[in-house]
C-alpha cells in the first residue's frame, strides 16, 4: 500500500493501459478520478475499480472540457498528488499509412490526440497539483524505434518524451516530478479501434509479437506496476526520466 492516502487522476483510465494503471494505483491505496470519453466504459471501469476511482467524462482534446474536469476533480479530491496522462494512442484509420499519403486531417487528429492533449492536460491540471506531485506521461517505444507507416504517431509520442524534460525543469521549484512511461506492444482493445479487418489486426499483432525478445505482448497490469513505481516515493530521486516497458524491443 505504498500509495495509501494519495489522490490521483488518470486520463484514459476507462480502458487499456490507463485502466491497468488505475487498477494498480488503487491496489496500492490511491483514490481518485478516472477520465475518459466513453461514458459506458467509464461507468464500468468505476465499478471494476470498486469505487476507489470515480468516473469523469471528458474529451481531452477539448481544452474547456479539461478545465472543467480538473476543477471538478479538485472539488472532489483536493490537491492532486498523482497525475497520469494515459489518454491517447494509435486510434483511427489514419494511424498506419505511408508517409506520402498522410493528409492534413489525419495529421492534425493524431497530433491533437497524442501531443496537444498531453500538453494541455498538464497545463490545466497544474493549478490543482500539490507541490511534490508526481506526473507520469505515457509515450511509446515508437519515439525510439522506427515503424514504417507510423510517422505521425511516432513524432507525436517523441514530442511527449521531450515535453517531460522541459516540464521537469520548469516545475522543479514546486518539486513536481515529471517522468515518462513508454510501453511497447500491450495487449489492449486498441488494435480493434484502428479501422482494420480482423485478419489485418491478427497479422499486426503477430508482427509486433515476433519482434519482442520476451516473446509476448505486455499487459496493462505490468504498465500499472511501472506507473505505481514512478508515482511513489520509491522513485523520489527520479525526474525527467523514462521507463521503457517493451519486453526488450528497443534495447536488445
Image: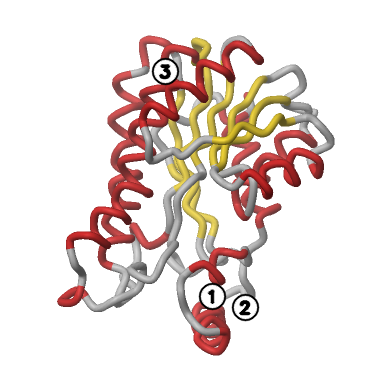
To which residue does mark 3 refer? Answer: 126
Could you tell whether 250 is left or right of 185 in the image? Answer: left
- Name the mark on residue 215: 2
Tell which circle, 3 or 2, labels the residue nearer the N-terminal end: 3
Looking at the image, do the residues carrying marks 3 and 2 touch, with CB atoms under 8 Å apart? Answer: no
Identity of the residue furthest to the front in this view: 39
For image coordinates 54% across by 44% down, the residue present is 37
Q: Is residue 36 above or below residue 201?
A: above
Residue 202 position within the rendered picture, expressed as x and y whole percent measured from the top left: 57, 84
Identity of the residue furthest to the right in this view: 50
> Given this view, does label 3 or label 2 mark the residue nearer the observer?
3
- Name the mark on residue 212: 1
Alpha-carbon neighbours of circle 2 within 10 Å: few (<14), some, or many (≥20)?
few
Looking at the image, do the residues carrying marks 1 and 2 touch, with CB atoms under 8 Å apart? Answer: yes
- Name the mark on residue 248: none
Residue 153 position within the rendered picture, expressed as x and y whole percent measured from the top left: 33, 60
Residue 60 position within the rendered picture, expressed as x and y whole percent measured from the top left: 44, 38
Could you tell whether 162 is left or right of 207 in the image? Answer: left
* Front one among 101 and 252: 101
Measure the C-alpha gap from mark 1 to mark 2.
5 Å
Residue 70 position within the rendered picture, expressed as x and y whole percent measured from the top left: 51, 21
Alpha-carbon neighbours of circle 1 within 10 Å: few (<14), some, or many (≥20)?
some
Q: Is residue 25 above or below residue 88?
A: above
Tell which circle, 3 or 1, labels the residue nearer the N-terminal end: 3
Residue 127 in view:
yes
For image coordinates 51% across by 84% down, the residue present is 197
- The secondary structure type at the circle numbered 3 is helix
Q: The N terminus is located in which quarter?
A: top right
- The secondary structure type at the circle numbered 1 is loop
Residue 20 in view:
no
Amino acid at each position: 500500500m505504498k500509495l495509501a492516502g494519495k489522490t490521483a487522476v488518470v486520463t484514459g483510465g476507462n480502458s487499456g493501459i490507463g485502466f491497468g494503471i488505475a487498477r494498480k494505483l488503487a491496489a496500492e491505496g490511491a483514490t481518485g478520478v478516472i477520465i475518459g470519453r466513453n461514458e459506458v466504459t467509464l461507468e464500468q471501469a468505476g465499478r471494476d475499480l470498486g469505487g476507489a476511482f470515480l468516473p469523469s467524462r471528458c474529451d481531452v482534446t477539448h481544452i474547456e472540457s479539461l478545465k472543467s474536469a480538473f476543477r471538478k476533480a479538485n472539488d472532489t479530491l483536493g490537491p492532486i498528488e498523482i497525475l497520469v496522462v494515459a489518454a491517447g494512442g494509435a486510434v483511427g484509420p489514419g494511424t498506419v499509412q505511408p508517409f506520402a499519403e498522410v493528409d492534413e486531417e489525419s495529421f492534425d487528429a493524431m497530433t491533437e490526440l497524442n501531443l496537444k492533449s498531453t500538453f494541455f492536460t498538464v497545463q490545466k491540471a497544474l493549478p490543482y497539483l500539490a507541490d511534490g506531485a508526481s506526473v507520469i506521461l505515457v509515450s511509446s517505444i515508437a519515439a525510439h524505434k522506427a515503424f514504417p507507416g507510423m510517422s505521425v504517431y511516432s513524432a507525436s509520442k517523441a514530442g511527449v518524451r521531450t515535453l517531460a524534460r522541459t516540464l521537469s525543469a520548469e516545475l522543479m521549484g514546486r518539486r513536481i516530478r515529471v517522468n515518462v512511461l513508454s510501453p511497447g506492444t500491450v495487449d489492449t482493445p486498441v488494435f480493434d479501434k484502428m479501422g482494420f479487418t480482423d485478419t489485418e489486426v491478427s497479422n499486426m499483432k503477430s508482427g509486433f509479437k515476433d519482434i519482442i525478445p520476451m516473446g509476448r505482448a505486455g499487459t496493462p497490469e505490468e504498465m500499472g506496476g511501472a506507473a505505481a513505481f514512478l508515482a511513489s516515493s520509491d522513485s523520489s530521486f527520479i525526474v525527467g526520466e523514462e521507463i521503457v516497458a517493451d519486453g526488450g524491443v528497443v534495447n536488445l
